[in-house]
Amino acid sequence: MSGNSFGKLFTVTTFGESHGLALGCIVDGCPPGLPLNEADIQVELDRRKPGQSRYTTQRREADAVKILSGVFEGKTTGTPIGLLIENTDQRSKDYANIKDQFRPAHADYTYMHKYGVRDYRGGGRSSARETAMRVAAGAIAKKYLREVLGVQVRGYLSQLGPIAIETVDWAQVPQNPFFCPDASKVPEMEAYMQALNKEGNSIGAKITVVANGVPPGLGEPVFDRLDADLAHGLMSINAVKGVEIGAGFSCVAQKGTEHRDELTPDGFLSNHAGGILGGISSGQDIVAHLALKPTSSLHLPGRSIDVHGNPIEVVTKGRHDPCVGIRATPIAEAMMAIVLMDHLLRHRGQNADVVHQIPDITRR
Amino acid sequence: MSGNSFGKLFTVTTFGESHGLALGCIVDGCPPGLPLNEADIQVELDRRKPGQSRYTTQRREADAVKILSGVFEGKTTGTPIGLLIENTDQRSKDYANIKDQFRPAHADYTYMHKYGVRDYRGGGRSSARETAMRVAAGAIAKKYLREVLGVQVRGYLSQLGPIAIETVDWAQVPQNPFFCPDASKVPEMEAYMQALNKEGNSIGAKITVVANGVPPGLGEPVFDRLDADLAHGLMSINAVKGVEIGAGFSCVAQKGTEHRDELTPDGFLSNHAGGILGGISSGQDIVAHLALKPTSSLHLPGRSIDVHGNPIEVVTKGRHDPCVGIRATPIAEAMMAIVLMDHLLRHRGQNADVVHQIPDITRR
Amino acid sequence: MSGNSFGKLFTVTTFGESHGLALGCIVDGCPPGLPLNEADIQVELDRRKPGQSRYTTQRREADAVKILSGVFEGKTTGTPIGLLIENTDQRSKDYANIKDQFRPAHADYTYMHKYGVRDYRGGGRSSARETAMRVAAGAIAKKYLREVLGVQVRGYLSQLGPIAIETVDWAQVPQNPFFCPDASKVPEMEAYMQALNKEGNSIGAKITVVANGVPPGLGEPVFDRLDADLAHGLMSINAVKGVEIGAGFSCVAQKGTEHRDELTPDGFLSNHAGGILGGISSGQDIVAHLALKPTSSLHLPGRSIDVHGNPIEVVTKGRHDPCVGIRATPIAEAMMAIVLMDHLLRHRGQNADVVHQIPDITRR
Amino acid sequence: MSGNSFGKLFTVTTFGESHGLALGCIVDGCPPGLPLNEADIQVELDRRKPGQSRYTTQRREADAVKILSGVFEGKTTGTPIGLLIENTDQRSKDYANIKDQFRPAHADYTYMHKYGVRDYRGGGRSSARETAMRVAAGAIAKKYLREVLGVQVRGYLSQLGPIAIETVDWAQVPQNPFFCPDASKVPEMEAYMQALNKEGNSIGAKITVVANGVPPGLGEPVFDRLDADLAHGLMSINAVKGVEIGAGFSCVAQKGTEHRDELTPDGFLSNHAGGILGGISSGQDIVAHLALKPTSSLHLPGRSIDVHGNPIEVVTKGRHDPCVGIRATPIAEAMMAIVLMDHLLRHRGQNADVVHQIPDITRR
């Protein structure tokens, strides 16, 4: 596959540029019989949608999704689901001035080296706008996982620049524009973002995603481990520079006695593994953390070169998120859901006739 | 593909268990005409080989590789290269006592849930012994990258438990049993490992891998980004719990003006991106960091359950690395080389007729 | 991949049902820099379009294609090309009566067994209407092959029921509604089809596709042979029941001295191989033949069962092609072009640095 | 994947050349818990083995297979199964004289164009010797299909040159060296082959493969239809030039009323479809026919060129099958079994929760 597909049995293929006519995707491999309509998908898209607070880009996109195939009389048919979102608020002329420029930390320079041409309007294919389709596809995966398996995939902002959360109250997540689970940190985040906007700068963030209720046994040994595929999926989100499973980088300084999650008949005693052992789900919560770099588009000038190799100064105009991490929570949830869904189908394919004789200590 | 293959055009498929007859792999897609013999591969295997210092497992495996196909008159033919390593020093009886036990932090419990059966001897397929074949396959990728493209892929131990290195002197890496690039830290590491062995405990580690000389343009947008495939490959190594590209998790607290790597006609001014922008190589060094958890096999007892769900106490016998990170450097190099090789072939396939008209600032 | 994608580097993924809102596809992996607009694709779609003669279905579809992404300022960018065709002339009520029926030789019965549900309107996903998107994707492959490599992919009807052509005059193919290269047979075909329509029956056909100018070296040994992938692609076209390469089934009664294509410095002396030796193109014309079964939708009653297992008599209403083979020529060309394009990219990826030292006898 | 793998969930990857050290393969995705030992595989290899009658090559290979992984205590574990066959009777010096020659109808010329080098000993990778590993892998698929699903995959020689069989008596197939199901034709075949050997010529053949007991529902719509994947697998066998499903090319002259297989509560009334409708199994016998070209290696001189482009006369020495079709029956069975196994796993993955409410008329 040529790079725009993800998943082996539950396969998502996307197309579309930031300032093209439309974004679209094909979800291939969704099991038949799942009740599905556009509202099921729209609710997730609305969580990612720009222009919902002063802390995200002011581009106004309805992000209204259309289901073009694969659903009949309100249920999935098992055939590919075509999804489409038309772009409505492009302001491509904002980008005319960067046609011959390479913006620092953007894909401009690398795309030109790869392809010899690039759609310079709003980043073209490298724009985070592409992630809308991942959220749409992920909404289908999330619905199946939730309704058929009772699996819940959800995430939160665990750090905004220097501000790390201290407690996780899931009920708080939808109550603020940051997906922040710690209400006590929200005023601090608001103040920080306002100062940042005034400065014209941007900031990084950390996201945590958790899947609850995943049955033990998902994942393949060796290359297609569940954690490896999660790392693939999550690192493929724009601006992500790091992925951790469970204890992540803190395991570097952990001793074996501290890290190992002991088992009892009533469950595991800890979850440093993040719910995955030997690349296979253990039934514990699957936990992943992502680091997102600060937005590359800044109103503060930076040094660069133009297509001829001359030194220039770049100031990015246009509308941008000052912290791409803020809207990344639904995207990370979507990718985790897609990975789980794919592994569920693969697992069922190979292991349908396994008779399980050992206790599932996470379900007691 | 069913989970034991990696790469789309340069594809590595492995088989073999820790205490089975042999380990093997098929490297499919290697370009023809590359001079190759067993010594080229053996040199890399010897770097990973157990039993070379008192800080690694005392299992004695020659890890002698045989090339069974794909090479004719000293050169690759373009057809699949079959590689085989026979196991010679299994002591399977060491494992009879854990037949009905689930060792904490091992894949025992999850394999049983997935497959209903498991080869309990030394972890079977979940053993890090499998990584020998990755090193073998990676040796071929490294050789091609080095000899045809001038790309150098190398790594080092950047942290051992609490001991972080402070300087990188590549010349030091092969001079000590830790792959440590900072000679001043080696005595500290030795002392730490001796105390750890006495204690019967294990410790985590951090590895850094760097590819130098990678041409700009490798990687695919969206899902098969170069960084996403690196994350996939590196996270698929046993015991890895975190992967960072470039600045990694430190980007969370970085502002845009700090993180963005400015461009000048004479090159980039920094490399927080780790050599990848928009999922595509920029020509700068590709830099990745990996976190490896402490070895799960400990001589210190831990709580667990048996296959019937009864609580038990587990003490792992057998021979084990007290720090799996110590031998992980060649494995991480191998996976990075395999990913780069695969993306090189994919890039050449799609973009063979691109005429490059922009300057390559990293080659000046 | 879940069954609706084809090709490894040049990958076509389609969606859409006969009576849904739209058909679409994503062409992933098209090289950048190819001049492309909707007219380039429309011209091929118009060749397949229904309602163009009295010998095809009277459904009136404009089959107007929209390019939604992947093209910028008139050239491909190397990113995925999204294509869309809206359905405009569905008459779904024609199908209400077959909701609970299984039409003989249709996919009704097998889809219900597979998925438990089916979109019964016009065959849903199993309809040959899906092939419009293959023709659209194939138009891009054909354009690249033609303009960049000088490869010409073209086809003709070689047999209509009992009427086999005797001579091939490529200039005649576009001059009649059958894609028949033998003008002397056209009146016979017209008379045959008129009698068939009156009878309410349908008939099979045979199509031949030829690629001229294919460079030697395309194809992979063993499983992904060029002929094997052609067989895959061509057999995946609705109604196809047989595929031959070169001599095809006539080789069964051939002796080695007759079948083998001898080589001279001035070229091959025959082409029983159909341009493929050992799964790899030889530089000769690639020649394939396809057998298409008679349309399954008949106005003549047939025995069947309903969803409850009761015996019924089925008479298909609606508008149908009396010979699906008539419109199959552009579809077969499209699939051959897609296969060649995919193998071209794969070949260039692996063998970019091969220095060819042997003569190409087909280019003299 | 790079061309030497087949199947998406049940994946077979092979390596090895005719005159290399060994042939091998990895079977990835086999369900766990299947009783398996070397004898299960050897029995199939012995059916394909050369040197068993005067009508096949006199090369003496024991083709003794070793299972190197994936089986523990007599059962498959779900991990990859490594298989190895060492070559024992190479006579590579037979080939020294063809080092610089291109044998007509062989892959010599095309391999040189593709790779720039070739292993000229006995065809190297293009040799039919590679099919031994397909038979080995297929033996595992056949065993699973037979023991777990009750599916029987078996084949026969349906035509040898001009001699077509007239009746099918399965009991006769193992009673003669031709896999001929029509005892009355065996003397004729023997006489034909003796005359052919004397002449130094070779002849084509036709093989028929049938799978009985396949449940309805296997196969994917559109590109990965069961018939398309069968065509892929069967056409990838050395020397195959044509593949038919069910009626195959005879459907060209069939009318719809003749071709369509009517349904009754007690089953289908005919099987022109060959057990596949809309790319999905119907529960009827899956029937495929293959055309195999005459062996290209002849003792009769043929015109060709050498690597410098000079005209030469080629006489192939060495030991060869005068009719490659004779030993092709087990290979064709193996490929059909592999395709069915792969589709079984894929189907179970996606459609595990489908509740089937319609009658299966083929199981009454």
Image (tube, coloured by chain):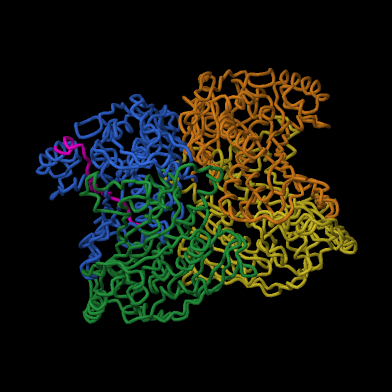
Chain colours: A green, B blue, C yellow, D orange
Q: Is residue B108 left or right of residue B183?
A: right
Q: Residue at x 31, y 37 (%)?
A: B314
Q: Which quarter of the rendering shows the C terminus of chain B?
A: bottom left
Q: Nearer the viewer, residue B180 or D116?
A: B180
**Quadrant in the rendering for residue C222:** top right
Residue C319 rendering spot, x and y as whole percentages: 78, 68
Whether residue B329 can be seen here: no
Q: How many marks?
A: 0
Residue D244 rendering spot, x and y as whole percentages: 72, 43
Q: Is residue A43 left or right of residue B47?
A: right
Q: Nearer the viewer, residue A201 or A161?
A: A161
Is B38 included in the stretch rendered in magenta?
no
Is B198 included in the stretch rendered in magenta?
yes
Q: Nearer the viewer, residue C36 or C149?
A: C36
**Quadrant in the rendering for residue C189:** bottom right
- In the rendered image of this protein, does residue D341 appear above or below residue A207? above
- In the rendered image of this protein, does residue D170 appear above or below residue B296? above
Residue B250 rendering spot, x and y as whole percentages: 22, 61
- In the rendered image of this protein, does residue D187 appear above or below residue A108? above
Q: Residue at x 70, y 72 (%)?
A: C61
Residue D229 rendering spot, x and y as whole percentages: 62, 46
Q: Nearer the viewer, residue D83 or A211?
A: A211
Identify the magenta region. B195-217
Whether residue C43 can be seen here: yes
Q: Is residue D159 left or right of residue A97?
A: right
